[in-house]
Image (cartoon, rainbow, N blue to C red):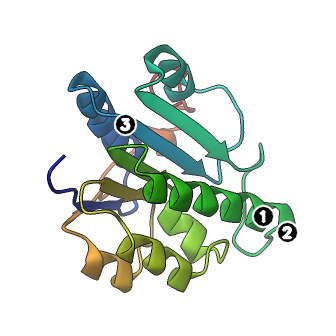
Amino acid sequence: MEKGLIQVYTGNGKGKTTAALGLALRAVGHGLKVLMIQFMKGDLLSGEMETARQLSPYLTLKRMGRETFILKNRIDPLDVEKAREGLLLAKKALEERAYDVVILDEMNVAVDFGLIPLPDLLQLIDSKPETVELILTGRNAKPEILERADLVTEMVERKHYYREGVPARKGIDW
């Protein structure tokens, strides 16, 4: 890629990770290499993990989290450790220019929860090579992140079937 941009998908609505995965699929279709690091998500089987296995080496997916839901007011030191490992992985991938697209899934939440210090993420963003596309997803994106972005899409929840008692569905929601 001649010029990589910074994209942010944020907001309280469903579809942030899905949008990033759609971009990844499109990039792979054009022969680009994509790294997706999922913060705060453990090794639970998901459709995107299976897809990454099938599309390897063009799509690489790394999960950096425990197999449990993380509450903002009950952070385990292991959550911080896993998130910092993910940040180091992202930094290395950018430095080595091993990928055309780097997706940091749920990074905004990791910053919001204090797992990743905002200055560390801003430094990573500012060090992005010119030719790499960087995507950050997750609710509660900080203003400093939005200022650095070339594209910001806010997903707004108007209606969600989960509120009507429909549980997450295999192949659709995970």
Q: Residue at x 60, y 40 (%)?
A: 62
Residue 158, numbered label: none
Task: Measure how far apart labels 3 and 2 are at the Cα level.
Answer: 29 Å
Residue 77, numbered label: 2
The spot of residue 42 in percent (x, y) is: 71, 42
In the displayed image of the protein, which residue is found farthest to the left?
2
Q: Secondary structure at mark 3?
A: helix
In the displayed image of the protein, which residue is found farthest to the front?
96
Q: Is residue 135 left or right of residue 43?
A: left
Of badges 2 and 1, nearer the viewer stands 1
Tell me if residue 164 can be seen: yes
Task: Measure how far apart labels 2 and 1 are at the Cα level.
Answer: 6 Å
Q: Amino acid at mark 1?
A: Glu
Residue 21, numbered label: 3
Residue 81, numbered label: 1
Q: Secondary structure at mark 2?
A: helix
The spot of residue 101 in percent (x, y) is: 34, 46
Figure check: 148 above or below 25: below
Within 10 Å of disc 1 (Cα), the crowding (few <14, some 14-19, many 20+) is some
Sequence-wise first label, 1 or 3: 3
The spot of residue 100 in percent (x, y) is: 32, 44
Would you identify the image quadrant in which residue 44 lies? Answer: top right
Tell me if residue 15 can be seen: no
Q: Is residue 125 left or right of residue 25?
A: right
Q: Amino acid at mark 3?
A: Leu
Within 10 Å of disc 3 (Cα), the crowding (few <14, some 14-19, many 20+) is some
In the displayed image of the protein, which residue is found farthest to the top?
54
Q: Residue at x 37, y 54 (%)?
A: 13
Q: Residue at x 67, y 71 (%)?
A: 115
Q: Nearer the viewer, residue 17 or 98?
A: 98
Q: Nearer the viewer, residue 85 or 112?
A: 85
Q: Amino acid at mark 2?
A: Pro
